[in-house]
Amino acid sequence: MSSLTLLEYSANAFFLISVFLAARNHRHTWTLGIIGCVLFAVLFFQVQLYADATLMLFFIGTSIIGWQQWQRGASAEAISRSSWSQLALYLLIAVATLLGYGALLHLHTDAYAPFVDSAVLTFSVTAQLLLMKRRIETWWFWLIVNSIAVPLYASRELMLTSLVYVGFWINACYGLWRWHRELNRPCQSTTEPA
């Protein structure tokens, strides 16, 4: 097994568990996610997906913050909705960042599919920030991310990663359903024990 293949298997294993735990609103999503992010950062850099490598560095930082926020347990924020104006602002910032970062990568690097790669980056950042605030719309953004990421990763012959992101797409549907159900029960604790 090549080192790239071993790296891809390892990164995906940690990410699979982390994403599954996120849908279950479990705080250990963050610690396992950090390990997966480190491994994916190396993998994406090796296959010239620089925006995705940058995204993993962002995820490491936000995972530390998210873990600290979710450590508060029952006193943490309940699952909630964003306003339409908040969502419009998030989308506007994401698209502007996508275009700017995509252009930067296109002009100054040998990045593969810089604008598509940047779409994964910017919509993932938006989804992650919404996840940290326990906003239900996080799952809609993850559905967008996964819909873009699957063909992108397949085009770089990261077939396992592409397949795992199909699973992430299904998990985002599950997360949306579960969080919607929990949103309708605001008086109960929504954080699972460690």
Image: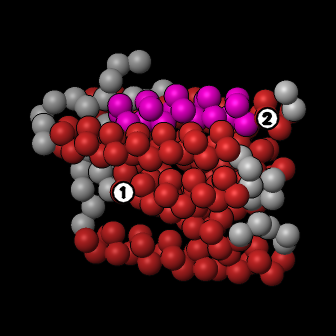
Task: From the image, tell me which residue sits under label 1.
Answer: 140
- Of helix, strand and loop, which one carries label 1? helix
- Of helix, strand and loop, which one carries label 2? helix
Mark number for residue 106?
none
Which quarter of the figure has residue 26?
top left
Asked whether, in this view, residue 89 is left or right of residue 122, the answer is left
Task: From the image, tell me which residue sits under label 2.
Answer: 5
User: Does residue 81 sit above or below 28 in this rendering?
Assistant: below
Question: Start and end of the magenta stretch?
Answer: 8-25
Q: State yes or no: discs 2 and 1 in contact (Cβ < 8 Å).
A: no
- Residue 194: % across, % down: 41, 18
The amino acid at mark 2 is: Thr
The amino acid at mark 1 is: Trp
- Residue depicted at 56% across the width and 39% down the height: 164
- Residue 79: % across, % down: 26, 44
Q: Quarter of the image containing the N terminus?
A: top right
- Nearer-N-terminus badge (2/1): 2
Asked whether, in this view, residue 174 is left or right of residue 149, the answer is left
- Residue 43: % across, % down: 77, 44
Q: Nearer the viewer, residue 48 or 183?
A: 48
What is the distance, in whole Å, between disc 2 and disc 1 at their CAs?
A: 30 Å
Asked whether, in this view, residue 47 is left or right of residue 192, the answer is right
- Residue 178: % across, % down: 26, 38
Q: Residue furthest top?
A: 194
Q: Nearer the viewer, residue 168 or 159?
A: 159
Q: Within the magenta stretch, is there residue 26?
A: no
Which quarter of the figure has residue 155?
bottom right
